[in-house]
Amino acid sequence: MDSGALLNPRGPLPPSVYWRRRLVLLGATVAILALVFAAYSCGNGDGTAGGAPTGTPRASTTKTAGGGTVQATAKATAARSPSAVASAKQKPTPSPSAKSPSPSAKRAAACRDADLEVEAKPDKLSYPSGALPVLTLSVTNAGPAACSRDLGQTARELRLTSGPARVWSSDDCADKAPAEQVVLKPGETRDFSVTWSRRRSAEGCPADQPIADPGTYRVTGRVGSVTSPAKAFLLN
């Protein structure tokens, strides 16, 4: 094209008309180029060529209160759509954890006779006429460690004697009871008390036993084969 014709358009219309047409065409071309550039920039906001997502999944490990671990993996998603967002999935991974045994599962060893101290005592040393003595059997773990012993009704006994005569026993009229295993800590004492009615008793619990006469009586205690020293008291 002739440069003169480009600068000085010729035709049946005035030159100003041709200049306006050229300016409109130039403006449209610039607008199209700007739109193309803007679309390209939005599709590649991270500055990389191409529209594929460039994020790399990252795995992080977090410790939990129970000692396990949780792995969180972030998955990269395309940023082209407003609804496309990064998501994280948490998946707990099992880890072995030792369970502490419950106290009931820990069984103490049986108490040896040598570890037990048995004591029998009245609540008073002298009783007036009509007063009822309260007799107490005490069992103490004198050993160095906790231990278990049957302290049920059948395993223990309080007995009264007067001279060589057997006067009364807590076993004579007691119903047979199942074993009652009790764990005693070192130095721990368990007490078992009974009120004596002053009436004599005999094996088999015969009825109509006589009232004991005034005098001196001795009380002893027993747990299994472990017995206590005798303690004396006076009945008036």
Image (cartoon, grey):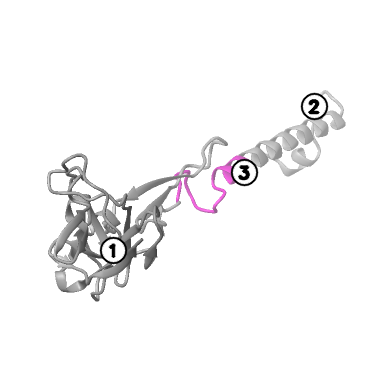
User: Which residue has dot 1 on it?
Assistant: 215
Residue 195 in view:
yes
Image: magenta residue range:
38-54
| Residue type, numbered disc 3 | Phe
Q: Earlier in the sequence, mark 1 or mark 3?
A: 3
Front residue of 137/27: it is: 137
Give the image location of residue 226, x and y in percent.
16, 67
Identify residue type, mark 1. Gly
Regarding mark 2 in the picture, which secondary structure is present there? loop
- In percent of width and height, residue 125 lies at 37, 68
Q: Which residue corresponds to mark 2?
A: 11
Quarter where residue 121 is shown: bottom left
Q: Are marks 1 and 3 in contact (CB under 8 Å)?
A: no
> Callout 2: few (<14), some (14-19), or many (20+) C-alpha neighbours within 10 Å?
few
| x and y percentages locating residue 83 in the rendered image | 54, 35
The first of marks 2 and 3 along the sequence is 2
